[in-house]
Image (spheres, rainbow, N blue to C red):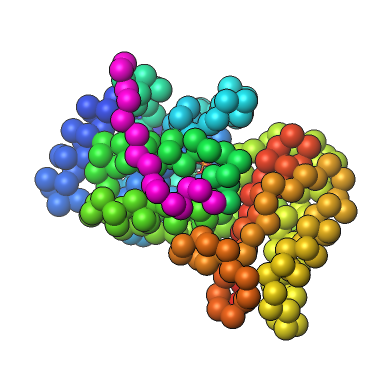
């Protein structure tokens, strides 16, 4: 079977291809990923295909978004499988740069946001969003998309990218894709591959805690602290769990909301064994 998927490794070639496509009036939709693709990534590709003529995916395990002691080396990778899946889902181009291609010798320019990263995941991962904002800005300048799709699974990342695009005046539409889940509710994540069977069983408590919080609000509980306390107790009752944070925040500013009198985003991060998992859900819509 001939391969329809075009694989581009160099920045110059990707940029040239994007310019060429734009010159012929094509619209480009971009889905950045770190690879080891699952149905969540593929759902973003499907969304992307509906929002433009040419679907460009990227696979790049971005070193600058991993802190010291995080799982950069261990991060799962399977390029042949990823390419087959991208081909199957109908991606047109995949950009697969090496770290040296993105972080050229002497690299020292970073994109940072003042406030949004200093919350939620940013508290335990202090360099993470600087790495994300920098690589996404750089990829945007290489892929030259009209629109880009990001998963709501990484809700803080989605809010940060929307802010970045607005603040820098980039002419790129940011589209949020819903979180894809396993049958028992666990949000799909490349990191789920780290879980042993017992941890995999405990891991469903994240989504279950979100569903229980949703129910509590429907039953009339309005104090965030009460919901957080009950959610914490529920999660801690599962073996091997260690809570990083549980928060109810404003969906745009990500500031804590004390009283639930409007829609809020509930977000949590929990270590299950040594694997850090995140999930979130809009409550009180
Ligand atoms: P990653 O490869 O983890 O950097 O993720 C690439 C993109 O896929 C990001 O926009 C993520 O938010 C998105 N994503 C990750 N997991 C899911 C999921 N379960 N459902 C939908 N999108 C997801």
Q: Which residues are magenta?
A: 105-119
Residue 100: tell me if it is visible: yes
Residue 42 vertical placement versus 233 (above, below) = above
Magenta: main secondary structure equals loop
Residue lying at the far bottom of the rendered structure: 220
Q: Quadrant of residue 214?
A: bottom right
**Side (left or right) of 88 relative to 195:** left
Residue occupying image coordinates x 27% and y 28% = 11
Residue 125 vertical placement versus 101 (above, below) = below
**Location of residue 75 in the rendering, given as x and y in whole percent from the top left corner:** 59, 29
Quadrant the C terminus occupies? bottom right
Q: Quadrant of residue 36?
A: top right
Q: Quadrant of residue 167?
A: bottom left
Residue 99 vertical placement versus 218 (above, below) = above
**Location of residue 23 in the rendering, given as x and y in whole percent from the top left corner:** 12, 45
Residue occupying image coordinates x 57% and y 39% = 125
Along the viewing direction, whichever of 161 and 36 lies nearer the viewer? 161
């Amino acid at each position: 079977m001939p391969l329809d998927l075009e694989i581009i490794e160099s920045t110059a070639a990707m940029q040239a291809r994007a310019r060429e496509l734009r010159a012929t009036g094509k619209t480009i939709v971009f889905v950045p990923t770190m690879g080891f693709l699952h149905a969540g990534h593929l759902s973003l590709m499907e969304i992307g295909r509906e929002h433009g003529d040419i679907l460009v995916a990227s696979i790049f395990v971005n070193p600058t978004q991993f802190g010291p002691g995080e799982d950069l080396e261990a991060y799962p990778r399977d390029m042949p499988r990823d390419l087959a899946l991208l081909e199957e889902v109908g991606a047109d181009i995949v950009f697969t740069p090496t770290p040296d291609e993105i972080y050229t010798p002497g690299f020292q320019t970073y994109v940072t946001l003042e406030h949004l990263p200093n919350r939620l995941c940013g508290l335990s991962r202090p360099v993470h969003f600087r790495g994300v904002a920098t690589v996404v800005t750089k990829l945007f300048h290489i892929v030259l998309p009209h629109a880009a799709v990001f998963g709501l699974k990484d809700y803080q990342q989605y809010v940060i990218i929307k802010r970045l695009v607005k603040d820098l005046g980039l002419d790129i539409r940011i589209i949020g894709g819903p979180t894809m889940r396993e049958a028992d509710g666990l949000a799909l994540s490349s990191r789920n591959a780290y879980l042993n069977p017992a941890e995999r069983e405990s891991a469903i408590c994240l989504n279950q805690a979100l569903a229980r919080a949703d129910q509590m609000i429907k039953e009339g509980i309005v104090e965030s602290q009460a919901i957080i306390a009950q959610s914490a107790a529920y999660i801690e009752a599962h073996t091997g769990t260690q809570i990083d944070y549980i928060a109810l925040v404003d969906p745009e500013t990500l500031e804590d909301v004390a009283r639930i009198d409007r829609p809020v985003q509930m977000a949590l991060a929990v270590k299950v064994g040594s694997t850090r998992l995140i999930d979130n859900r809009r409550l009180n819509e």
